[in-house]
Image: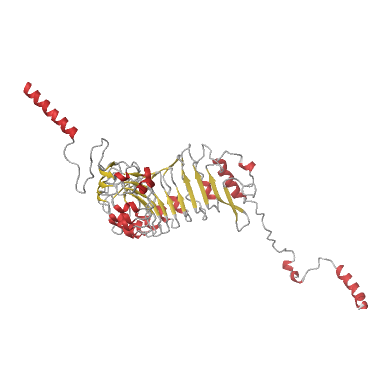
Amino acid sequence: MHCSFSLSLPLILLLLSLPSSIPSASTTNPHHANKQPPINAPKPINTMAPSEAEALFKIMDSMSSDQNWRISHPNPCQPGSSWPGIECKVGKDNYLHVSRLDFGTPPNPTCKKTATFPSQIFALPYLQSVFFFNCFTHTKTTLTVPQNRASPASLQQLSLRSNPALVGPIPPQISTLKSLEILTLSQNRLTGPIPLEIFSLGSLVHLDLSYNMLTGTIPYQLGSLRNLQGLDLSYNMLTGAIPNTIGQLGLLQKFDFSSNSLTGGIPDGIEKLSLLVFMALSNNKLGGQFPKGLEKLQSLQYFILDGNPIHSPLPLEFGKLVKLQELRLADSGYSGTIPESFSQLKNLSTLSLQNNRLTGEIPVGFGSLSHIYHMNLSRNMLGGVVPFNSSFLKRLGRNLDLSGNPGLCLSPSEAHSSKIGVNVCGKNNNASSIQPWKKSQAPSGLSKPLFLFTALCVWGLHQMLFLV
């Protein structure tokens, strides 16, 4: 063994002394003798692509004067020193990319008075969400989407809210933002009709155009937004009828068309919205009969229809919407009695029926509505004894208003419970006897003061005629 080791030692020394430039078997091909294999060294993940960084600097220079962004934050996405109001993600290219921008109120960058809408945001290829809140307040600006530039395929949320200097129409080029899921253009001063192109955004889940000055009708193409779950067109100047195609929005959970000038009735297609939770149509010019399939809306929890010239009896079907929590039907000219079926709404917390022409008695079952905390039946023509015990009256307190119903009175045993705007049965403020109206009874004839005044006028006229 010792001899073998001693003989191999020179061989080992010989191998170590060979030049390192001897080609290996894999590089003996002369065509590859001078080439090195490609080295894919990873880029540092705390840097941005120069072109994207420059676009971001231009946006910030035009929007905010909070600081000199190029000097104070030369690496906008660098961990530990990133800009406020910015989120970044590492892309497949190992660069950091802007994925979210927020402008408007601290801690996000505030907007200077000369700020206008920066269409350069659409040049940020990885941008997913952008928010402008109370940003454009002094210098008038418009929402601009470049027509010939490829928009970021990643943009999912565009939100411009509370910008009083954002004016003009919604551009039809907004249809190029094919990945949009949430579009919020609320509380601005946008004008003109709703562009038809907006209804080609098939990925939209939420669309909010409320509190603007939009005009025209609600296009029937609305029905093409099959993924829509929330729709808010309230507080505009929209006219015409609600399109029946709204019934094609099978995933819709909330829609609000309040405070427009919509006419016609609630379309029959509404019955297909089985997931609908919230429906608001108050302060329009809607009338006519309710849809026959109203009772199919078994998910409905909030139904708000104040301030419309409905002028019909209250539909019995409301009593079958057992999940209802708020039912607001004030100022709408409803007549007839309050259906007893309303007493089946055991989840009801708010009932507003004031300023209608309702007659008859308050349903006795209302006293068993254990979740109710606000009830307004004032300014109707209701009569009879108020069917609420002292615990019910105490629980609601000032949230119960029965005033303006001269035929209503409160049982003497409950008179001490609360002031609800009605007299005690058998007494009025002058301690004279009053009785509750019967169901078919209503005040008629001249009141005593008016009778005396009329008699004096006739007597005076008689004296003048005969004294001449």
Q: Residue at x 92, y 75 (%)?
A: 6
Q: Nearer the viewer, residue 365 or 254?
A: 365
Q: Nearer the viewer, residue 102 or 403?
A: 403
Kindly tell me whether residue 290 is visible in this rendering. no
Q: Residue furthest top?
A: 468
Q: Residue furthest front?
A: 413
Asked if 392 appears above or below 299 in the picture, the reply is: above
Q: Residue at x 31, y 45 (%)?
A: 413
Asked if 459 appears above or below 11 in the picture, the reply is: above
Q: Is residue 78 left or right of residue 388?
A: right
Kindly tell me whether residue 128 is visible in this rendering. yes
Numbered label tally: 0
Q: Please state the horizontal and vertical placement of residue 166, each as a whole percent of the image.
A: 45, 41
Q: Is residue 386 left or right of residue 235?
A: left
Q: Nearer the viewer, residue 181 or 456?
A: 456
What is the quadrant of the C terminus in the image? Answer: top left
Q: Please state the horizontal and vertical placement of residue 336, each as a whole percent of the image.
A: 24, 50
Q: Is residue 86 left or right of residue 43?
A: left
Q: Quadrant of residue 434?
A: top left
Give the colour scheme shown: secondary structure
Q: Please state the horizontal and vertical placement of residue 71, each as a whole percent of the image.
A: 64, 41
What is the quadrant of the N terminus in the image? Answer: bottom right
Q: Nearer the viewer, residue 47 or 461?
A: 461
Q: Please state the horizontal and vertical placement of residue 306, each as a whole percent of the image.
A: 32, 47
